[in-house]
Image (spheres, helix red, strand yellow):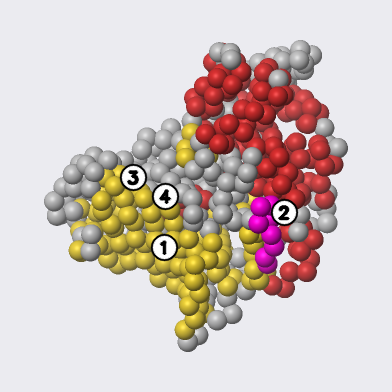
């Protein structure tokens, strides 16, 4: 995710607040009280659920032709139990559950906060294969207490599930540590086009409606799911190695957006020159007529506000670097997902790093100058948001507030310091090995520290402890003259 500058204006903040969503799950009471669970994430302690590993999701949505009415939906989850379970907790909120089946038989279910709790007739032993099918609604109209989930565009819908909002759209194990394969079916009235993550596997037309089916070829975290429904045109082009590139644009803006979209294949080639081959089966941009204040790296189909490309105030080099930011996430954050949300800096720091590097190489915008400016602000960022690898908890009612400067330029600054410390050649080899070793998986900050030590032949624990967890910004290797301004509360006389 990248919070773009216009997100800071009051009008944009108000629009982003409209993404908030409240819990409204209507459920049949189970025979005993149900309780919410979580995997213990430091920032989102009730997110995700223990006891099982999801292998795949099959999602079906029926769009009624209005983005102010609930969609009818069916979610089927195939999973392995990792321990004996007498209750199965799913994350789900902001929809009405009509029925639940477990292995083809009706199951008892109940709501507990933002969990949907399913009770099997008999406890499932560890190692059991289970299939859960939930018939439910998926409400695109947000309330004022939760952000994320469906994004209402001028002509339909898109998704923005980061960090903890996929379960506002469909039942799931809503934590990036549990990646799974996805099949997504969308039925919409004539005149609409639906696109989702992965590649198309079928288009079925019936009287007055069309059903599109998409399937991923690589596992995906729930927060990266994407479905676009709108009066859209899908544009196709070829990327490196014959990679299919497809973009989804509002039909009426196709001509204006094409000059930007045609840059994507060369940007993919540029990223491949830095970190290796693109990790997925397709890529493209979803240009949404929506007022979100951010761009989002949804897997294989990154979400952008159309206005980013049509607002003349944004310099060309800036827009292109933002395109590369979300593209870089396909390696850093999508293919290699964070094991916990405290590892967010691995996503955003790397995406910011390649955004800055692209701006330097293509537009002459100095990385060193950007990092020096970041160094000057770093102590203030750490005081406000925590150090890069130990960000402060999100603000109440604003879950995306974990996306603060400390995990963007503050984290990129730590990567710059690492390159200064171990040298450019070793740093570049580290980046390639990192995305290769953890491809299609999840990884932790400790994993990155261990690999950096391995690649450099040095124990870097102390270096990373200071840069990733310290309250104060350490001295910059090679730039002893760089200074960081203290937070206002720590300045003499203030």
Q: Secondary structure at mark 4?
A: loop
Q: Residue furthest right?
A: 364
Residue 180: give its label.
4
> Which residue bears the numbered disc 3?
53
> Which residue bears the numbered disc 1?
59
Indicate the position of residue 262 as horizontal and vertical percent values: 76, 59
Indicate the position of residue 417 as horizontal and vertical percent values: 68, 21
- Depth check, mark 2 against mark 1: the one in front is 2
Residue 264: give its label.
2
54 and 396: which one is in front?
54
Tell me whether the residue at label 4 lies in contact with that at label 1, contact meaning CB atoms closer than 8 angstroms. no
Q: Residue at x 59, y 49 (%)?
A: 297
Magenta highlight range: 235-242
Q: Residue at x 71, y 40 (%)?
A: 273
Q: Secondary structure at mark 3?
A: strand
Mark 3 vs 4, N-terminal side: 3
Mark 2 vs 3, N-terminal side: 3
Q: Residues within 10 Å of mark 1 (few under 14, many from 20)?
A: many
Mark 2 vs 4, N-terminal side: 4
CA distance separating discs 2 and 4: 27 Å
Q: Residue furthest bottom?
A: 207
């Amino acid at each position: 995710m990248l919070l773009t500058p216009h997100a800071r204006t009051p009008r944009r903040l108000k629009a982003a607040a409209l993404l908030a969503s409240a819990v409204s799950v209507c459920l049949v009471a189970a025979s005993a009280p149900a309780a919410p669970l979580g995997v213990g994430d430091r920032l989102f302690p009730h997110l995700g659920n223990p006891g099982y590993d999801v292998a795949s999701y099959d999602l079906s949505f029926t769009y009624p032709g209005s983005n102010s009415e609930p969609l009818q939906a069916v979610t089927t989850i195939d999973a392995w139990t990792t321990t004996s379970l007498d209750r199965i907790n799913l994350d789900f909120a902001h929809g009405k559950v009509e029925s639940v089946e477990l292995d083809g038989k009706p199951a008892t279910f109940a709501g507990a906060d933002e969990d949907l709790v399913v009770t099997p007739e008999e406890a499932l032993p560890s190692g059991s294969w289970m299939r859960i099918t939930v018939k439910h609604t998926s409400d695109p109209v947000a309330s004022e207490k939760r952000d994320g989930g469906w994004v209402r565009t001028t002509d339909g819908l898109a998704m923005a599930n980061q960090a903890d909002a996929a379960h506002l759209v469909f039942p799931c194990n809503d934590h990036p540590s549990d990646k799974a394969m996805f099949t997504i079916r969308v039925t919409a009235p004539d005149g609409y086009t639906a696109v989702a993550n992965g590649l198309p596997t079928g288009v079925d037309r019936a009287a007055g409606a069309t059903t599109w089916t998409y399937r991923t070829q690589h596992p995906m975290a729930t927060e990266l799911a994407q479905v676009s429904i709108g009066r859209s045109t899908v544009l196709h082009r070829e990327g490196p190695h014959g990679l299919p590139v497809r973009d989804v644009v509002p039909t009426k803006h196709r001509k204006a957006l094409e000059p930007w979209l045609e840059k994507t294949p060369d940007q993919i080639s540029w990223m491949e020159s830095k970190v290796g081959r693109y990790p997925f089966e397709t890529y493209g941009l979803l240009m949404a007529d929506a007022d979100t204040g951010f761009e989002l790296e949804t897997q294989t189909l990154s979400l952008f506000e159309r206005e980013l490309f049509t607002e003349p105030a944004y310099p060309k080099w800036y827009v292109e670097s933002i395109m590369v930011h979300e593209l870089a996430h396909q390696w850093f954050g999508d293919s290699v997902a964070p094991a916990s949300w405290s590892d967010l800096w691995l996503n955003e720091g790397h995406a910011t790093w390649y955004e800055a590097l692209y701006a330097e190489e293509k537009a002459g915008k100095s990385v060193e100058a950007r990092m020096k400016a970041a160094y000057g602000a770093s102590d203030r960022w750490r005081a406000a948001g925590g150090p890069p690898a130990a960000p402060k908890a999100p603000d109440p009612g604003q879950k995306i507030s974990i996306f603060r400067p400390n995990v963007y330029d503050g984290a990129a600054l730590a990567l710059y310091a690492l390159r200064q410390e171990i040298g450019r050649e070793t740093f570049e080899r580290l980046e390639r090995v990192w995305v290769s070793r953890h491809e299609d998986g999840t990884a932790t900050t400790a994993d990155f520290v261990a690999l950096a030590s391995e690649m450099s032949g040095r124990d870097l624990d102390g270096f990373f402890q200071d840069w990733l967890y310290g309250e104060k910004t350490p001295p910059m290797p090679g730039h002893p003259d760089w200074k960081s301004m203290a937070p206002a509360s720590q300045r003499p006389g203030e």
